[in-house]
Amino acid sequence: MVDVTALGEVLIDFTPAGRSEGGIPLFAQNPGGAPANVLAALSRLGRRTAFIGKVGNDAFGTFLRKTLSETGIDTTGLGTARKAATTLAFVHLDESGERTFDFIRNPGADTLLSKQDIPDELVMECRIFHFGSLSLTHEPAASATIQAVSAAREAGALISFDPNLRLPLWETAEHAKAMIATGCTYANIVKISEEELEFLTGTTDLIRGTKQLLDTYGTDLILVTLAEKGCFIRRGESRLTVPGFVVDTIDTTGAGDAFLGSFLYRLLERDIEVSRLSEQELIAIGRFANAAGALATTRKGAIPSMPSLTEIGVLLPDMKASEYVEKYRPQYHFSPPSNWMNDPNGMVYYEGEYHLFYQHHPQSTIWGPMHWGHAVSTDLIHWQHLPVALAPDHNGMIFSGSAVVDAHDSSGFFDGGSGLVAIFTHHDTVQASETAADAGAGTTSRTRQRQSLAYSTDKGRTWTMYAGNPVLSDESIVDFRDPKVFWHAESSRWVMVLAAGDHVRFYTSPNLREWTFASEFGKTEGSHDGVWECPDLFELPVDGHPHERKWVLLVSIGDSPDCPEGSRTQYFVGDFNGESFSSDLADDEVIWMDEGRDNYAGVTWSDVPAEDGRRLLIGWMSNWKYANFTPTTSWRSAMTVPRVLTLKRTDEGIRLYQQPVQELSALREAPLGWSALAIGPDRPQTIDWEGKAFELEAEFELAGAAEFGLKLRKSGSEETVVGYDAALEKLFIDRTASGESAFSPAFAVRHDAALKPDGGRIKLHIFVDWSSVEVFAGGGRAVMSDLIFPDDASQGVELYAVEGQVKLISMKIYPLASIYSRQAVSAGQS
């Protein structure tokens, strides 16, 4: 089902673009048309949209069709008129950015839309149907519009209407008023300007004018846009004025459409009737829409000006929990405000802030041209979202990498002071000559990956690309990426560990700008089920003893079609002398950091203060098997909870242990406790408590059961099982009935991890969020992280046992507060 279908005009806005040398005004071609603009705003925020209309059989029509498709709008309902040209509008801006229009539409292709041109499925299978008045100016489009609106309303869609008064396009003002009145009779929501309110009602008084519209047409909700002053919302007797935002306005062309699209976006997220929204919710939605409308005025054009959720979040001073309630949105895991996210990048601590950069596509919810998204935190839990830090340039996209504090200005970037330096992979495509055997066959393209630098003198808020980029390249290696850099005190120089296809390479540098090859590792060691990626190298004490230390090398393994597990992360324990790494493991020995399906590309924070002493890691909570297809809308992907890494000696050798950071305990609400329960096949224990975001600690004593554990996020048809197979001594997660899984055949599976009992007991520490479960067992020896997508109603907890009994020694459940409930998205603090 489509979220929003819009019917109406899509046209070319020619906006002012300076003057020629002779003083003649110049105009830039921009895609526009109010209904299409509203869809562009919604698509930018991740919603599924479809457009119905017509363009001419000309270059302008081709351009518009391509633009809508690239914006993510379904164009199956966009027809081509053979006997009319695409409508053109020339926009004139005054000094304040306000605009007037001159139209070329005699007739325009959009006016020739007929009833037969309208696909029934786009009308009958949408949640919101939106239209404007300009498709009502002429036949056959007017009759086609009324028929489509009537059918959509009868099918249960919410109807949104924007009069969008453009008097030059109407035969008479009386005709315009009559047809706009017809549109209002069908609408649940009407968005109008102050000028349009006066045109329809004869008054500029917001209260009297909107009351007249409500009484005349029975509209559920009226939105009056007030430019920089904000908006006025009328629903029944509720009258709400929501203040706007002051920005540097350039062009107001797309402001009203950005406002309406963003308003509809928030309505869709709540998925309830307009009449059931509280006044506080209406105000919150209005503020969000005002921010979107204001941001649209800071760029020229309409469709190109639509803001992302990230940009809106930066402008809003205090986005609250009510702004982050999309289905499956985690409530205490880091997720991007909007669009695509994958690998964590550049984690560094500097002057009281933890920086988290991440692979980000700011225009889509699927992987695409990579940027570095950016957020900071003072506690690893509450995050302040900042603007994109690094964007593609002439050297290519911004792939993964790291960041360090250059405390003594070894790079020369900081005039003797200190600052942050990011070291990352530039990825581009270049033309390469064919081999000699194919001489004469022309050229072919190939990918190229090189390492580059950027630096910041203002605590990471702005970044300057180093003029000498790239600083390291080897074009004989295709996969040459993801540099992790750290200062090696013993040799007094920087060390880089870099993924190189089927192994890692080590480089050294005195200044971050000039790098010398030192050694390589891994061609015959570990798993080679996929390409090696995102390495990290660090030293840890063994069992906490400061004089016994080992180095840990993390290497993530990309997805291979032959491996059902998909992408995951292995690690090696060994020694590093400043130039080369040697592993204590046998060459064919493989140890996985996390035995779940959804912890990938995890790396650790640099420059954590010595007095803290922790090695802190965070991972991308997804899997390349299905990362592009998980069932979220405006955003995609989250990070794991931050973890503390330690090394402990075990019977199998020295192994990595993980524990969630202590800071998470600040989210705990009053606990619920149970103890001394006997669980058997005929005695499952349903817990008298429900929740979607919580922490659970449980200790079981083996008493003969072949299998036992917990069923989480349980309902009549759904459950995620965290269990233990006593015979095989394996912990497992079974998400075969966890909820939505049709997006990938690789998702609904059961998988396990080795775990021996400790004194005949099994201890589990579990974190459940709206779309994930993370299990730390045996004190952090076995760790499993999995995505789940249950229905909101699946909130139960049940204890179970199979073929025998198990004794629950104790269990505590801590409901966890949302990280957004403390106005922390922008505050960055609890």
Image (cartoon, grey):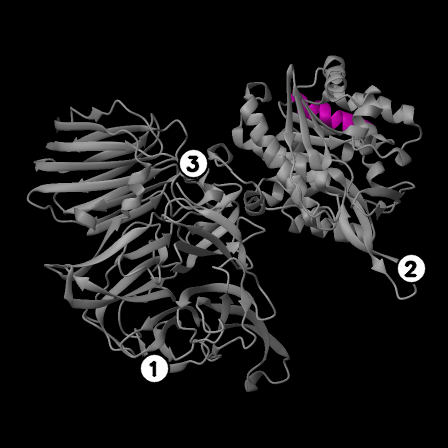
* Amino acid type indicated by mark 2: Ile
Classify mark 3: helix, strand or loop: loop
Residue located farthest toward the top when viewing the structure as drawn: 215
The residue under the point 25% across, 56% down is 645
Q: Is residue 214 something one can see in this rendering?
A: yes
Decide which of tag 2 and tag 3 comes sooner along the chain: 2
Residue occupied by mark 3:
822
Question: Which residue does the image show at 53% across and 63% down from the upper left?
Answer: 463
Q: Position of residue 88 (x, y in %)?
A: 85, 47
Above or below, comparing residue 821 to residue 82 in the picture? above
In-front residue for pair 234/104: 234
The residue carrying pointer 1 sits among few (fewer than 14), some (14 to 19) or many (20 or more) residues within 10 Å by Cα, namely some
Provide the secondary structure element on which disc 2 rests.
loop
Does 22 sit left or right of 768 as displayed? right
Instruction: Identify the residue position indicated by label 2 in the image.
Output: 24
Q: Quadrant of residue 333?
A: top left
Residue 568 as seen in the image, left or right of residue 477: left
Name the residue nearer the viewer: 559 or 92: 92
Q: Which residues are magenta?
A: 143-154
- To which residue does mark 1 refer? 518
